[in-house]
Image (spheres, rainbow, N blue to C red):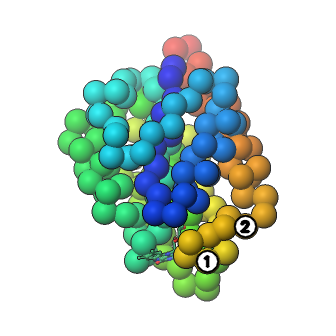
Amino acid sequence: MKALVIYDSGFGNTKSIAEAIATGLSSLNAKVLPVGQLRPEDISSGDLLVVGSPINGWRPTQKTLEALSRLGSRGLAGVVAAGFDTRVKLFIHGDAARKITKTLKDAGASIVAKPMAFYVKGTEGPLLDGETSRAAAWGEELSANARAYGTQRSA
Ligand SMILES: Cc1cc2nc3c(=O)[nH]c(=O)nc-3n(C[C@H](O)[C@H](O)[C@H](O)COP(=O)(O)O)c2cc1C
């Protein structure tokens, strides 16, 4: 199983979270890539794919939506996946993580974690205290869930 964390980022906060998640996924030797550099053929059945985007106007960024659409047209059967976003802590903030997760699921991926949100203080950041540690812990959880899923499938 290999792991890929792909992200879009305007000001670097989502990139920092993607890198922290990859640290937590260290046992899977995760690769971190900007969403535009993802080639759908880089992903095979059995891999773990994590996709993250800032919320921009209540949804994932355009680049993220385009990458998801490319992935979706190829199909993600057998791929294990999860989605996250970064957002400002507001009463009404919209959502990107749920939309990413739903699109991954609709493309055939097996979802191994609930959509996850990480918080920035303002549009350009910085991240709230503790968010990179929380991202690393989430990465560890993903890695355990993905392994358990793989074991279950081959049993
Ligand atoms: C054009 C634009 C629209 C945004 N819309 C939202 C929004 O609807 N809800 C929200 O919580 N944050 C919103 N934000 C704040 C972003 O989520 C925040 O800038 C992002 O998490 C920072 O991550 P980045 O450094 O990776 O770009 C918006 C930011 C921009 C630039």
Q: Is residue 44 left or right of residue 55?
A: left
Q: Is residue 43 left or right of residue 31?
A: left
- Lower position in the chain sequence, tag 2 or tag 1: 1
Picture quadrant of residue 102: bottom left
Residue 142 can be seen, yes or no:
no
Name the residue at 24% across, 44% down. Answer: 70
Picture quadrant of residue 141: top right
Image position, residue 138 (x, y; %): 68, 45
Q: Is residue 141 left or right of residue 82?
A: right
Image position, residue 61 (x, y; %): 37, 64
- In the image, residue 99 above or below residue 110: below
Q: How far apart are the alpha carbons under marks 2 and 1? A: 9 Å
Image mark count: 2
Q: Is mark 1 within 8 Å of ligand 1?
A: yes
Near mark 1 (Cα within 10 A), the count class, few <14, some 14-19 or many ≥20, is few
Residue 12 can be seen, yes or no:
yes
Q: Which mark is residue 63?
A: none
Which quadrant would the C terminus be assigned to in this image? Answer: top right
Residue tagged 1: 122
Q: Is mark 2 within 8 Å of ligand 1?
A: no
Name the residue at 56% across, 29% down. Answer: 30
- In the image, residue 21 above or below residue 89: above
- In the image, residue 116 above or below residue 154: below
**Which amino acid is tagged 1?**
Gly
Image position, residue 130 (x, y; %): 78, 58
Q: Secondary structure at mark 2?
A: loop
Q: Secondary structure at mark 1?
A: loop
Residue tagged 2: 128
